[in-house]
Amino acid sequence: MPRRILSEARCEQCFLRREYCYCAEIPRLELKTRVSLIMHWTEFKATTNTGRWVRLALPNSETRLRGEKDRLVDLNGLWDETRQPLFLFPQENSPVLGTIQYDRPVTLIVPDGTWRQAAKVWRREPILRAVPCVRLPEGLPSRYRLRRAPQPHCLSTLEAIARALGILEGKAIETALLRVFD
């Protein structure tokens, strides 16, 4: 089948074939918390990527691509002094999200890619080393079955963000995002 026909048969937002697209079913959630995905470029059009659903559900979110050859990711303006930046990744010795109170709205910075790609983001981007790293509390295992996780506690991007927003914004937000995932 010619490439042109394939691309026309796919949704421009989720890249799924039109008959499987459910973009119209995704709720639009207005939050105080801002979510910034630092997505590996190979994930951008991957139909198994769950970060795109977050972008569609949260109008106050953004995606910045990294890992492109000869092109640095632009992290300027990722947050400002009116917001508390937090990097969501299970680093050793990082505090559990929700155990520390913040006096300003949060910008949740989340790496999006394979586990190997995501682990490199905080280490390779100097501006992010100044951002406090937080992890999620222990919880149920991932329900994601399209990719294999390296450890039982590992979650897909959408599941991790849903749980984090459940802590920061309330359980109703977590439930709404997990409904998209399901």
Image (tube, rainbow, N blue to C red):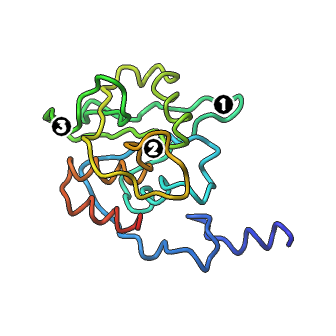
Q: Nearer the viewer, residue 46 or 70?
A: 46
Picture quadrant where residue 28 is located: bottom left
Seen in the picture, residue 97 relative to 145 is either above or below; the reply is above
- The kind of residue tagged 1 is Arg
Mark toward the viewer: 3 or 2: 2
State the residue at coordinates (18%, 39%). Answer: 98
Q: Residue furthest bottom?
A: 19
What is the secondary structure assignment of the residue under circle 3? loop
Vertical position of residue 97 compared to residue 161: above or below: above
In front of the other: label 2 or label 1? 2
Residue drawn where x is 42% and y is 56% of the image: 54
Residue 95 in which image quadrant? top left
Please name the amino acid that badge 3 sits on: Arg
Residue 83 in the image, given as x and y percentages of width and height: 26, 36
Name the disc covering residue 37, or none: 2
Q: Is residue 74 above or below residue 48?
A: above
Q: Where is residue 47? Give x, y as percent.
A: 60, 60
| Residue 153 as seen in the image, left or right of residue 136 | right
Give the mark nearer the N terminus: 2 vs 1: 2
Which percent across, then down, holds residue 147?
Answer: 55, 52
In the image: residue 125, left or right of residue 110? right
Mark 1 vs mark 3: which is more N-terminal? 1
Q: Which mark is residue 104?
A: 3
Q: Alpha carbon of mark 2 to alpha carbon of mark 1: how far? A: 17 Å
Tell me the element at label 2: strand
* Mark toward the start of the polypeptide (3 vs 2): 2
Residue beneath disc 1: 71
User: Quick check: 53 left or right of 95?
Assistant: right
Residue 27, labelled with which disc? none
